[in-house]
Amino acid sequence: MRRPLTTAFVIVSCCALACSPAEQKAPAAAAPEPSGPGVVAGTAPPGAIVVLLPATGEVPMPEGPAVMDQYAKTFVPNILYVRVGQPVEFRNSEDMPHNVNVTRRGTGTAVFSVATEPQNKHVHTFDRTGQYDVMCDIHPGMQALVVATPGPLATIADEQGAFQIADVPAGSYKVAVTFEGRTVERPLEVKGPRTEVRLTIP
Ligand SMILES: [Cu+2]
């Protein structure tokens, strides 16, 4: 999972450099000082994708593609979080032919299936939020998962429906829950070390 560590460090170090101890104790002035990052945790439908998005504005797209490699008869990494709209390179970095067969989890809908020759790659851009099973038809043991989300603060609720997203900078968010192809959003204020939320799909 990708976390905005850079953002968190920038906020902390700016305050440490710019504020004297007296100013740090003073109540927030016109622009409230965000507190440190916290954990957002709670429950959602089991297997749902949970994503925190800023309440306003866009989330910058990462530079460059995400990469899932095929090496030693294994997909590396085994679980890859990518952004909707971000190119994903499916590489083959060994001297053995493979194949990349991607289906949408839940419906089993075919997304694509291509041969990946040694030292070659196939680029695909996922255009909607979802979980995608990745297989190699040549080597049945080769399996992986791509999770496409609209933002980097994302996770999947476990079999009991529990989820946790760490290192969330304080602020106003939309929390988006995607379950069985439907997405529901609601506002969420994140402050303090832990924010609990119960997410349901009506
Ligand atoms: Cu293979």
Image (cartoon, rainbow, N blue to C red):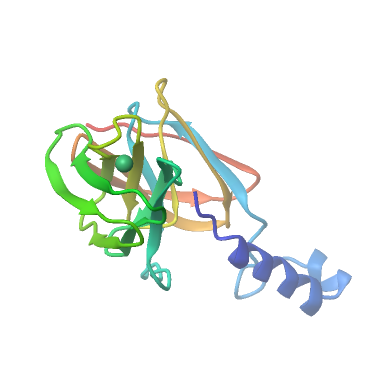
In the rendered image, the residue lying farthest to the front is 95
Q: Please count the marks in the image.
A: 0
Identify the residue at image location x=80%, y=71%.
Answer: 16
Q: Position of residue 37 (x, y in %)?
A: 63, 54
**Image side of residue 129 versus residue 197, left or right:** left
In the rendered image, the residue lying farthest to the bottom is 18
**Depth check, front residue: 106 or 110:** 110
State which image quarter holds ligand 1.
top left
Q: Position of residue 196 (x, y in %)?
A: 52, 36
Q: Quadrant of residue 54?
A: bottom left
Q: Position of residue 51 (x, y in %)?
A: 39, 48
Identify the residue at image location x=61%, y=66%.
Answer: 6
Q: Judge whether 169 appears above or below 139 on screen.
A: below
Image quarter hosting the C terminus: top left
Residue 142 appears in the picture as rendered: yes
**Depth check, front residue: 149 or 198:** 149
Identify the residue at image location x=32%, y=34%.
Answer: 48
Q: Judge whether 42 appears above or below 124 on screen.
A: above
Identify the residue at image location x=34%, y=46%.
Answer: 147
Q: Position of residue 179 (x, y in %)?
A: 25, 36
Q: Quadrant of residue 169?
A: bottom right
